Image: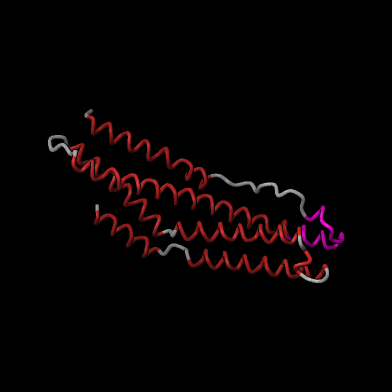
């Protein structure tokens, strides 16, 4: 094997290894972090605590989904960003170093170009950046609301019933925001195909 063949092998190995965090996020579940003292230790009445605890238990599946989506989209986003920057830096130097007598040198450029084109096509087609922002923002907004409700329930209303009702209402608003953002960022099959075709033509 020539030096260029070794470089191709090395590039494939490194690109595969750096994708492992994204693959792990895709294949494994997530666990919600412990949030400290919750509704059980709040100043609400027993009836109010039960309503809030039941509501939060129904919301945990949604929060876990948001967290998983935020993590996997974040990791793929940074994977794409890192390799785009790296390849755009390397390509001019590799182009100048091509050995006309060694076909592997040209194949290295092809492998790098194909890899980046494919990654960018999926990033744009699946709208990874938009999905990462939507799920991360929704997750952050809810936990801010959750902490504010526990720390300063008086800002939600004059009495317990009004406070709980306002908390439920604002939680629903956040859920609708994330749902709408998720729907708007759903990949369109035709758009994805178009991105891949454009990338292939560039290569």
Residue drawn 58% across the image and 67% down it: 177
| Relative side of 115 to 73, left or right | left
Residue drawn 63% across the image and 58% down it: 62
Residue drawn 67% across the image and 65% down it: 171
| Relative side of 66 to 12, left or right | right
Q: Main secondary structure of the magenta part?
A: helix
Where residue 122 sits: x, y (%)? 39, 55
Relative to 133, say whether 75 is above or below: above
- Judge by depth and name the residue closer to the eye, 104 or 88: 88
Relative to 164, say whether 30 is above or below: above
- Judge by depth and name the residue closer to the eye, 82 or 186: 82
Magenta stretch: give its range: 39-55
Is residue 54 visible in the rendered structure shown here?
no
Q: Residue furthest right?
A: 46
Relative to 91, say whether 144 is above or below: below
Where residue 28 sits: x, y (%)? 55, 44
């Amino acid at each position: 094997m020539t030096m260029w063949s070794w470089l191709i092998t090395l590039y494939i190995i490194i690109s595969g290894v750096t994708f492992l965090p994204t693959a792990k996020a895709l294949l494994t579940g997530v666990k919600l972090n412990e949030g400290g003292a919750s509704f059980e230790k709040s100043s609400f009445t027993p009836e109010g605590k039960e309503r809030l605890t039941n509501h939060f238990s129904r919301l945990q599946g949604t929060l876990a989904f948001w967290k998983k989506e935020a993590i996997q989209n974040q990791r793929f986003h940074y994977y794409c960003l890192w390799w785009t920057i790296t390849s755009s830096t390397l390509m001019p130097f590799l182009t100048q170093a091509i050995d006309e007598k060694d076909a592997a040198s040209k194949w290295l450029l092809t492998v790098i170009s194909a890899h980046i084109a494919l990654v960018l096509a999926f990033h744009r087609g699946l709208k990874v950046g938009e999905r990462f922002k939507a799920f991360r923002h929704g997750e952050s907004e809810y936990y801010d609301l959750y902490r504010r409700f526990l720390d300063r329930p008086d800002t939600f209303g004059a009495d317990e019933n009004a406070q709980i009702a306002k908390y439920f209402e604002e939680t629903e608003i956040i859920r609708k925001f994330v749902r709408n953002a998720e729907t708007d960022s759903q990949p369109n099959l035709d758009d994805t195909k178009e991105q891949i075709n454009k990338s292939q033509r560039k290569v």
